[in-house]
Amino acid sequence: MSLRTSRPARAGQYLALLCYLVFLAFPFLWLISTAFKPAPELGSLHPTWIPDSPTLENFRQAFDEQPLLRAAGNSLTVALSAALIAIVIATPMAYVMARQRGRLATAATGWVVVSQAFPFVLVIIPLFLVLKNLHLINSLFGLIIVYVVWSLPFALWMLVGYVRAVPAELEEAAAVDGAGRLRMLVSVTAPLLAPGIVATAMFAFITAWNEFFFALVLLKSPEKQTLPVILTHFLGAEGVADLGPLAAAAFLATIPSLAIFAIIQRRITGGMLAGAVKT
């Protein structure tokens, strides 16, 4: 009887998952279709999924109109730097917060939760004044610091959960075998945290890669602007979008995030017990 009832439930779960995937994929597939459509099809009253006459003209115009490669380089520099710095800071902090019980850990957890409640608009003015006093306005380094600070609370929250999932008995067993604190962390705990570290780094990277508001306010020189800011330049003076080149540029902007996820997805889903076996 339980088997009969589980099959409809499982079918319903798969159907819901399929609907959710279609919901997520629709904007991306439409973006790809628009990127390869010629101008007459973009203005058609009866749009189609597959372009009748696919063209690369939109990509050529996008590169001719805006410095996409330079902006992508700026975004890559900022996103990678912010992700690496956030991980280096968050990992030891998360370990202490997860293993130590007390007022400090409770206060840190409360800070993580409260910091996520503040919208960008409330912090941009004091943040701008602080960076101005530090002479970091219109600086990629200043933007990296902002992204590190902004992604650090959520990175801590994610990593604390991963650390707590690692049984403390493994560390105790290593200590009984004579392993010191550093050896215990490197040989036992760190391999088990690898999937969580990779997932957190990916979150920090994607957050910095896609962020627009801080980059718009803090970066004024065209040669330092990031890719999300450059995409706004495809809007005309009257707010009319140059749809073909904009879709082509936006499609190219999504490729790094998809590529990074495709590369590291095995690391996220596999190896959770690597290092748990004593050698």
Image: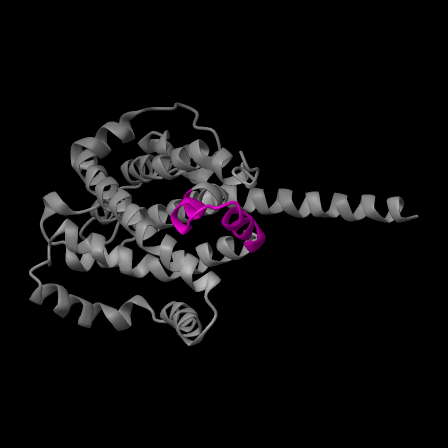
- The answer to whether residue 260 is seen in the rendering is yes
Res. 104 image quadrant: bottom left
The stretch drawn in magenta includes residue 182: yes
Residue 223 in which image quadrant:
top left
Query: What is the number of callouts on the image?
Result: 0
**Residue at image coords 57%, 42%:** 22
Relative depth, front residue between 23 and 13: 13
The image quarter in which residue 256 lies: top left
Q: Is residue 46 shown to the viewer in this render? A: no
Side of 63 where 278 appears, left or right: right
Residue located at (54% from left, 53% from top): 172
- Does residue 219 sit above or below 274 in this rendering? below
Q: Which residue is at 47% across, 29% downward?
A: 50
Residue closest to the eye, 47 or 243: 243
Please check the rendered image and state whether residue 209 is part of the magenta-colored stretch, yes or no: no
Residue 188 x/y as whole percent? 49, 44
Q: How is the image coloured?
A: one colour
Residue 260: x, y in percent?
Answer: 39, 36
> Taking 146 as reference, is 100 left or right?
right
Q: Main secondary structure of the magenta part?
A: helix
On screen, residue 267 above or below 179: above
Most foreground residue, 32 or 184: 184
| Left/right of residue 44 with respect to residue 135 in the rendered view | right
Counting from the top left corner in percent of width and height, residue 80 is at 28, 43
13 relative to 110 in the view: left or right? right
Q: Which residues are magenta?
A: 168-186
